[in-house]
Amino acid sequence: MTKLVIQIPCLNEAETIAATIADLPRAIDGVDEVEILIIDDGSTDATVDAAKAAGAHHVISNGANRGLAQSFQRGIDMALRLGADIIVNTDGDNQYNGADVAALVRPILDNKADIVVGDRQTERIEHFSPLKKRLQKAGSGVVSTLANAEIADAVSGFRAFSRQAAMGMTVRSSFSYTTETLIQAGRRRMRIASVPIRTNKVERPSRLFRSIPHFLVRTGRTMLRAYAMYEPLKIFALLGVALMLAGAAPVVRFLIHYFAGDGSGMIQSLIIGGVLIMIGAIATMFALLADLVAYNRQLLELTLERVRKIEYDLDAQKTAPKKRLPIEKLREELKAIRSRTGS
């Protein structure tokens, strides 16, 4: 039996949430059960009431505004607790065509992908400016390189996750989940696919960012941080080598003048070069330490994934007592893992 949970993070979407929910399919070939989960991120309007009236099965509230990334993560956790085999994330502003959910989950149902991203085909969207289209293409290219996967529309929020993929997702950004989750998935060698989707025109300005420069800065910082978590050796080693090469130039300049008999006036080149080489060497040592930390992080991620699985199995036993699980064994295993990780 395959269960699909469609999660919708919302912030003051009272005017559009009913239309968003109405567009979502209730029956999909290969899916036995479809449920809709609303994550209210501190809305001050009637978003929650409108969602319930429109037929949302589950509504959880953050109490206060925590941001899109944390609302997404909370939705993933709740969907897994609800027993979702596939999780689809969409926006509450009805930007994405709900009928395309079926196409989005198909690669997962066919076991051809772990994560599927809806490709908005931004080059065909008329209300996107030429600059925005170029930025979308360039940004997706950067994320594809960092994730080591082909991703057509990296910032699309319309995406599907298998249960296993969702269980391994840990969003730490306070801004957006889109690029961070893809870089995580790519570096963990998950299968990422893209499918073309349709979009609806959204008139209101984005609530996620104030301007394009603001979006670029926040997204760039998120991508760098996410990539550095998995490839710290490469980043710090490249930085260290670059600094040492930069320091070698003035040192060579000093040596040339010194052996030519005019070294006294070039001492500043030796000092500058020596400092740069020393900083580069320190950065290289940091690269080795960071690589060890990254390895430890991978172990912690595997432990966290295992803890989540045990917790969800315990929840499943509470909700389905007929399917008895070795609860005492699960509790002992969970206690042992928590004692090892200090959590």
Image (cartoon, grey):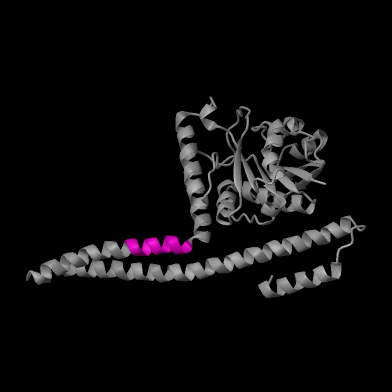
In reply to whether residue 233 is colored magenta, the answer given is yes
Q: Which residue is drawn at the image coordinates 61% and 67% (left, top)? A: 299
- Which residue occupies the foreground of this view, 134 or 107? 107
On the image, which quarter does residue 318 sit in? bottom right
In reply to whether residue 7 is colored magenta, the answer given is no
Q: Which residue is drawn at the image coordinates 75% and 52% (left, top)? A: 80
Specify whether 77 is left or right of 278: right
Q: Is residue 16 visible?
A: no
On the image, which quarter does residue 55 sit in? top right
- Which residue occupies the foreground of this view, 151 or 280? 151
Task: Look at the picture and state if 166 lies above or below 128.
Answer: below
Specify whether 200 is left or right of 60: left
In this view, the residue farthest toward the right is 322
Q: Is residue 281 visible?
A: yes
Magenta region: which residues?
Answer: 232-242
Q: Which residue is drawn at the image coordinates 51% and 46% (left, top)? A: 144
Q: Position of residue 92 (x, y in %)?
A: 69, 37
Task: Look at the picture and state if 2 lies above or below 18.
Answer: below
Q: Position of residue 225 (x, y in %)?
A: 51, 56
Task: Look at the picture and state if 234 lies above or below 258.
Answer: above
